[in-house]
Image (tube, grey):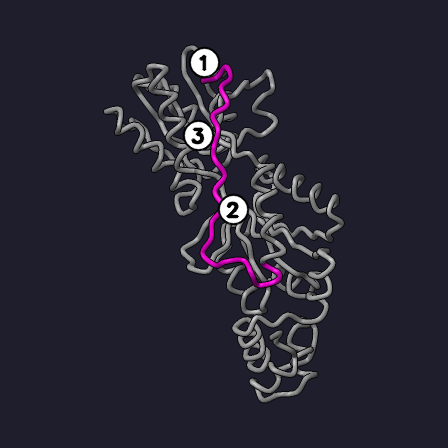
């Protein structure tokens, strides 16, 4: 039997108008009563009428919250979400987390919008964002990130498997002095890609000579590359946790008079369009972003209707794309 606003009002010992106001960010209602109503709505599976109406017509209003828009993969993912939303006739709003990482202003805008679901795409503070959204009975789907969360619904690539593919390729090429240039140490993408890389090296009796943190950033990785290539025992095989950093390593190798694919082998991760440019011809692990976005789109109706099973992670297989650099 469908739960109604009257049921929520009765359980919370309040009025029907209070239940309605609880789902509008700009409405006047005490924080304590709003939270009690939203908690009961989440527990009972209640949806306000506007959200139910859109659910029946399969027309949704989604927000994609993204960080590091300068990262080519994030920009590519955003384009894919926009394209698919347009085809489906869905309303899509984009929120970009500023470099400072401050959430207050962004969350005020998110909560003031009339949304059905929030997609957290590569957002560093995603656990905090998800908590705030769920407190407002707003479904959340993680994209390209996972958290320690029993109720999490997420879509990501096989980061561990991708790390293994990179290691196996470098070993096959005969590399002996190996380097890993990672992202930010606390992110799931960094941790899983690094773990897969190390495990595959260990299986081949190899280990890392250099273990660096590049923060997924071109400039930081460029400095790492310049340092690498000035060493007497410079690495001959390098795996970067994203393409953005791999581009920096290719540029640093070129500046040092080394030829990627001959003097040094460099592998990235993402397979963004720049990876195929003649300037880079980057061997990389593809995240298959179109499939990741499509899997996320398929989860949205379930999330809105509260039928998406909690604790489910859709994992898209990684694929090694071999080009000149490695």
In contact (CB < 8 Å): disc 3 and disc 1: no
Give the mark, 2 or 1, whose residue is nearer the N terminus. 2
Residue drawn at 59 percent across, 15 percent down:
278
Report which residue position mark 1 lands on: 261
Most distant residue in the left direction = 205
For the residue labelled by badge 2, is the local secondary structure a helix, a strand or a loop? strand
Quadrant holding the N terminus: bottom right
Report which residue position mark 2 lands on: 155
Determine whether, in the image, residue 25 is placed left or right of residue 289.
Answer: right
> Camera-side residue: 162 or 191?
162
Residue drawn at 68 percent across, 80 percent down:
28
For the residue labelled by badge 3, is the local secondary structure a helix, a strand or a loop? strand
Residue 56 spot, x, y in % from top left: 71, 61
Residue drawn at 69 percent across, 43 percent down:
84
Judged by depth in the image, the label closer to the viewer, 2 or 1, is 2
For the residue labelled by badge 1, is the local secondary structure a helix, a strand or a loop? loop
Determine whether, in the image, residue 134 is placed left or right of residue 5.
Answer: left
Circle on res. 74: none
> Camera-side residue: 3 or 136?
3
Specify start and end residues of the magenta stretch as a single range: 303-326
> Camera-side residue: 13 or 25?
13
Circle on res. 240: 3
Distance (Cα) linking label 3 and label 1 = 15 Å
Height in image: 23 above or below 321? below
Residue 307, magenta (yes or no): yes
Specify the quadrant of the image occupied by residue 4. Answer: bottom right
Residue drawn at 70 percent across, 72 percent down:
26
């Amino acid at each position: 039997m469908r739960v109604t606003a009257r049921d929520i009002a009765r359980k919370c010992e309040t009025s029907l108008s209070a239940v309605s106001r609880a789902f509008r960010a700009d409405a006047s209602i005490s924080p304590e009563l709003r939270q009690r109503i939203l908690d009961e709505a989440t527990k009972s599976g209640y949806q306000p009428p506007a959200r139910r109406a859109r659910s029946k017509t399969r027309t949704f209003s989604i927000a994609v919250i993204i960080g590091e828009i300068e990262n080519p993969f994030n920009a590519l993912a955003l384009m894919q979400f926009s394209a698919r939303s347009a085809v489906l006739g869905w309303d899509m709003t984009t929120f970009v987390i500023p470099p400072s990482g401050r959430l207050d202003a962004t969350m005020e805008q998110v909560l003031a919008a009339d949304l059905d679901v929030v997609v957290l795409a590569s957002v560093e503070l995603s656990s905090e964002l998800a908590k705030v959204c769920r407190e407002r009975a707003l479904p959340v789907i993680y994209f390209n990130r996972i958290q320690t969360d029993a109720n999490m619904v997420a879509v990501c690539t096989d980061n561990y498997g991708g790390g293994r593919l990179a290691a196996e390729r470098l070993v096959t090429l005969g590399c002996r002095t190996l380097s890993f240039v990672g992202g930010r140490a606390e992110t799931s993408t960094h941790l899983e890609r690094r773990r897969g890389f190390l495990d595959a090296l260990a299986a081949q009796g190899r280990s890392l000579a250099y273990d660096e943190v590049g923060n997924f950033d071109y400039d930081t990785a460029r400095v790492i590359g310049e340092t690498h290539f000035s060493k007497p025992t410079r690495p001959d095989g390098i795996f970067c946790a994203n393409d953005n950093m791999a581009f920096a390593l290719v540029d640093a190798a070129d500046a040092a008079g080394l030829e990627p694919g001959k003097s040094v082998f460099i592998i990235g991760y993402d397979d963004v369009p720049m990876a195929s440019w003649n300037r880079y011809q980057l061997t990389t692990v593809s995240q298959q972003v179109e499939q990741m976005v499509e899997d996320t789109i398929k989860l949205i109706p379930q999330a809105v209707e509260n039928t998406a099973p909690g604790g489910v992670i859709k994992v898209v297989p990684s694929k090694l794309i071999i080009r000149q650099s490695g």
